[in-house]
Amino acid sequence: MRTVLTALGDLMIDADPERRIELRNFGVFEVKKTKAKPKARNPRTNETVFIPSRRKTHFKPSKRLKEALQVPLRELGYAIPEGSADAHLEDVPLDVVAADGTRLQQDGEAVDGEALDGEAVAREAEEVAEPKRETQAA
């Protein structure tokens, strides 16, 4: 496994922005070039600074990987520790809640500043699941 990851890392380092590395049923790694930012600001000094363009890595998971990650941890035999901040999210589908606990809109974007408690997360999950059940029954 270490050899595969090392080879993948070497490909990403040497990659030009046009290269895609696709691993079927896993995802796509890409190197993307960021734009230069001529008017960025240093927050400490309030000075305007130039930030040159750079390369960054990007990973897009495959549909199959996304579906596999939707399975609740409990079904896989894992238990979230009692004091964990994520305990209230244990059985909630990932397409309802962002990683920071905020509710997601239909397009997958988080609603600004709208964090959900455990009960609200469960209600939201049920609301999302209901239309799916109705369409399957029809």
Image (cartoon, rainbow, N blue to C red):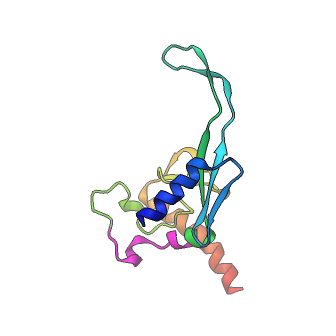
Left or right, 57 with reference to 5: right
Left or right, 83 with reference to 88: left
The residue drawn where x is 51% and y is 67% is 93
Residue 66 at x, y = what percent? 57, 68
The residue drawn where x is 62% and y is 71% is 24
Magenta-drawn segment: 67-79
Which is more toward the observer, 12 or 45? 12
Q: Is residue 130 above or below residue 43?
A: below
Figure disc tally: 0
Residue 121 at x, y = what percent? 48, 60
Instruction: Reply yes or no: does residue 73 show up in magenta.
Output: yes
Which is more toward the observer, 129 or 61? 61
Which is more toward the observer, 37 or 16? 16
The residue drawn where x is 43% and y is 54% is 117
**If the image is split into quadrants, where does the C terminus sit?**
bottom right
- Name which quarter of the figure residue 67 lies in: bottom right
Q: In this view of the protein, can residue 76 be seen by the observer?
A: yes
Instruction: Reply yes or no: does residue 121 show up in magenta.
Output: no
Residue 57 at x, y = what percent? 58, 48
- Name which quarter of the figure residue 1 lies in: bottom left
Q: In this view of the protein, can residue 98 be seen by the observer?
A: no
Residue 8 at x, y = what percent? 53, 58
